[in-house]
Image (tube, rainbow, N blue to C red):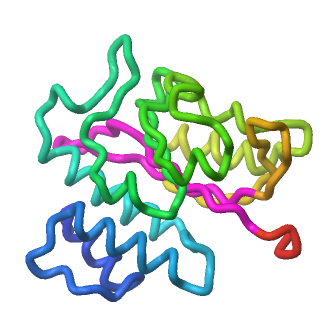
Amino acid sequence: MKPTERGRKLNRELAPVPTVGMTASTELAELLDARHAAAEPTIPSAAVVESVATLLGEIRAATPATAHGGGEEPALDWAPQAMDETPVSMVVSGPAYTDNPIWYVNDAFERLTGYGESDVLGENLRLLQGPETTAAAVADLREAVDIWEAVVVELDNYRADGSQFQNRVAIAPIADDTGTISNWVGVQEQRPIAER
């Protein structure tokens, strides 16, 4: 099955919305809105974040190469409006071989963490870790990056003001049109302390 077909199949299974004639950007918006409205966690499994990554790969492939980001200035000019407007915290980072520098954060990320885009561009999301961040969850994230696989973990993170929160983090690689991993997407969701 081609990656785009797989992503659409996952969308139909996990967020039952019509997909006929939709653009990847519209499909992404509907997937994120449907998942955010669900009673369960926004990203309950690696399959959901893989679906998000597949759609982002399609969106990236449809933009000129000059908009793909990277180089001296971390930037991402292909982020669709759906990413900017979703209530789900999202980050896109650069390739793993450069320590996954942050290239994009949306407004929901800024609200969740207190970090503005200018504070985090070019940084690694390790900046959210602190004394209570569990080593096992961090190891799961590192392993996923090392083997180019999606993963969902829960860990304690810290906002810009130093306050602690439980964060459900899902990451997945974004493949380009050749199948090469071009970026990573991260989705974050604050979880109530009682759910630990």
Residue 81 point in image, percent of width and height: 29, 54
Residue 96 point in image, percent of width and height: 47, 30
Residue displayed at 54% across by 84% down:
38
Residue 168 lies in the magenta stretch: yes
Q: Is residue 70 left or right of residue 142?
A: left
Residue displayed at 25% across by 32% down:
68
Q: Which quadrant of the figure has residue 71?
A: top left
Q: Is residue 174 left or right of residue 64?
A: right
Q: Which residues are magenta?
A: 167-191
Q: How many circles with numbers are drawn on the protein?
A: 0
From this viewpoint, which residue is outermost toward the top? 72
Q: Is residue 34 left or right of residue 189?
A: left
Residue displayed at 83% across by 43% down:
135
Residue 144 point in image, percent of width and height: 57, 47
Q: Nearer the viewer, residue 174 or 29?
A: 29
Image quadrant holding the C terminus, namely bottom right
Q: Nearer the viewer, residue 117 or 168?
A: 117
Q: Which quadrant of the figure has residue 26?
A: bottom left
Residue 116 lies in the magenta stretch: no
From this viewpoint, which residue is outermost toward the right? 131
Residue 87 point in image, percent of width and height: 50, 64
Image quadrant holding the N terminus, namely bottom left
Q: Main secondary structure of the magenta part?
A: strand
